[in-house]
Amino acid sequence: METLKAWLDGRRMLPPWVAMGIALVVLAVSIPYVLKLHFNNAPDIYSPSDSPTIQLRASLFKEFPNDETIVVLFEGDDLYTPGFLSALDRVARTMERHPSVDRVLTLTTVEHIEATDDGFAVAPLVDARKLASRSPAQWKARVLGDPFAPGLLASRDGRAVALVVRPKFLKESLARRDVLIALDETVVAEKLETHRTATAGTVAQTVEELRSLWRDSAIFIPTTFLIGMGLLWWVVGRVRPVLIGGLAMSVTVAASVGGLVATGQPYTPVTAMIPTLIAAYTTATLLHLYAAIQRARIALLPRPQRIARALKETLVPGLFNVLTTGAGMLSLLWVDIPPVQAFGLSGSIGTLMVFLVVFVLMPPILLKWDVPRWPRRRSGLAKARRIAAAVSVFSLRNARWVLGGTALLIAVTIPLAMQVKVESNLIEFFSPKHSISLGTERIESRLAGVTGLEIVLTGAGRDALKDPRRLAEIKALQQWLEQQPEVDRSLSVADMIEEMNRALSGEPAGVDALPTSRKLVEQLMLIYDGSDMFELVNREFQRGRIAMSLNVHGVNEISAVIDRIKAHLAAHPVEGVQIRMSGYGQLFADQTDRIVNGQLKSFSSAFIQILLLMALLFRSFRGALICLIPNLAPLFFIFVVMGVTGVALDVATVLIAGVILGITVDDTIHLYHGYLHRIRHGVSPVFAIIRSVESSGRAVIAISVVLIAQFSLLGLSDFRPTAHFGALCAVGLFAGQVFELLLMPALLGLRLPRQDTTLKARSA
């Protein structure tokens, strides 16, 4: 106990060389893991592995192809000439040899069902070996006369064709990137780059997210360090504390990111915000320590006593800061999205690392190597003192007006906060001028939408989907689906069987040609010698799928389509068939409930944990509420800003409540801890309030500048979820600073007699 008390009082520290050695060892152990950083943004990692959608997808991939694609659009007036078609075929054949590619769909690789004298035959839509057998006009007429190609692989005006690369099921973003790079190189090698006007598709979208992640990491991580060190210089005004701060940031960030790698977690756009968060939090914690050292310097204490007194003042609040910030981070475990949970776990461990580095390793290093005296008036901390004191005096003098005005402001802006929507839109993750946004828009203006959604049909036994009545019900369902404005095309085994029967019977296009007898269906299956149909139904004809092309990309729009389909199926079921929704669209739509439920649980968990921790620290439930109220106001303000600007709640912005509540409450703890300390030493309440704000408030303002600057940096990202997270965190931290300096003195001074408050505030 004596050792612990000595450590808490700042009288017991590690030997300087031991502290430096530990810091360097942690850094040396972490760096190899950081160098093995596993970048990944594949869509499946955003869903729990045991979720029904993931399990259904896994079972479907055993029988059916992946529904994620890269779509390349070629445009021109010579698309049906032998030169272009042969080059297009060579691109397709080259890409099909890529180890990560399952199939390439284009005019020369898909089947065409045509009538023959003795029935029907399955042949290539465009036979690359017989291009000279038809004129370009004849090839064009054949393609546009096919029941499936127009709208999927060729525009109806004949001026655009598509090449669709369908990878195998790839769990890694790097593998997706390799496929896209190989495709780009092949298109260039075949001299088709002048015809290519767009590239899109879900695989291309995730690759662009990966590239954005790389750019952000390469720019923002070092810039965050430079900003942190620059602001430390502004606050302290000396080189050695800044360099020691740089060492602290290096250790904490490297350990946090290295921990992600060591535990097998991927580095996603969500977890990529960990370095900025930990660097900012390290800087903020250091500033509290440095502010206490500065106060001890002003008190003319010798160097060892300065460090000891600074530790005594900041260590206990710092410990509770770690606990409250960690609680805010851990609350994200309630969000059932694995990268968000990884962010929360890594952030909580990182904050613990910050505490150990700043309060255990850095003080002996400062004591040993930071020998020269600190300046008394020159630093940014001294300049911040006047602002903090002026705001606190104003708040004390006008406590009721401040609290009443805040309550009125909240009441007036509640409708704005209620406008916040839960939304994720893959296309809107990028700016309208981004290549993926422009490419998607161009492709969807000429062909079908690029968002895939599937209806999985499972019969009771073998050959269940050969029943003509079921085929007719499936066809009726498709006709209803294609009346929905969001559904451009649908395709199922019923389409294939109908086309075979049309070729066999000679029925014209537009006339219902579905077989009416089971025997005829069996006969068609005996004649069919292709393979395309078995991408829509398994060979046992027990399970099949209706593949849809949607022209919407937002999770709310996709969810609305899914809900409408489910309602229609409930009213018009397919007899004897179990129906489930799947595909990329379903995977994406699942995020809505996870975000909403996770946000509610996360905020409730963080609020309760932080409230209880502060009640334990201050041994007062009232004191905990006084500290927490100013930190709820900026959270509300963030939602108001989101409602006004239209920024939605998504996988990135869902992090904000836990992060902001965990960080902003730190400064409040320091302020209130200083207030209680002075009260216990006989200082009057008014002077205790003002002096606490003067001493801790200087660091609080400086810390806010540091944090706002570092989070604002993320706002420059071209990946909008990251930009929104950074900008809103900066807004929240600024609002937190304002509300903290306004509301804390007002809440503390509310019970004091007005005359006493006014006189003493004026004299202060």
Image: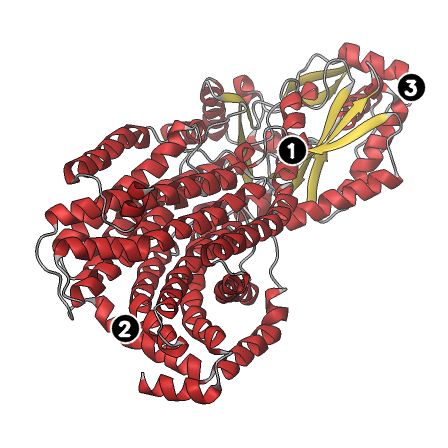
Q: Identify residue type, mark 1.
A: Gly
| Residue 19 found in image quarter | top left
Q: Identify residue type, mark 2.
A: Arg
Left or right relative to 720: residue 122: right
| Mark with earlier residue (3, 1) | 3
* Proximity of marks 3 and 1: CB atoms separated by less than 8 Å: no
Q: Which mark is residue 517?
A: 3
User: The C terminus appears in which quarter of the rendering?
Assistant: bottom left
User: The N terminus appears in which quarter of the rendering?
Assistant: top left
Evaluate whether residue 190 shows in this view.
no
Residue 443, given in percent of the width and then of the height, sits at: 55, 43
Of the two numbered discs 3 and 2 in the rendering, the one whose residue sits closer to the viewer: 2
Q: Secondary structure at mark 3?
A: loop
| Mark with earlier residue (2, 1) | 2
Evaluate whether residue 517 shows in this view.
yes
Of the two numbered discs 2 and 1 in the rendering, the one whose residue sits closer to the viewer: 2
Q: Identify residue type, mark 3.
A: Ser
Q: Which residue is mark 2?
A: 385
Residue 464, given in percent of the width and then of the height, sits at: 84, 18
**Label 2 Cα crowd, 10 Å radius (few <14 / some 14-19 / many 20+):** many
Residue at position x 27%, y 71% in the image: 384
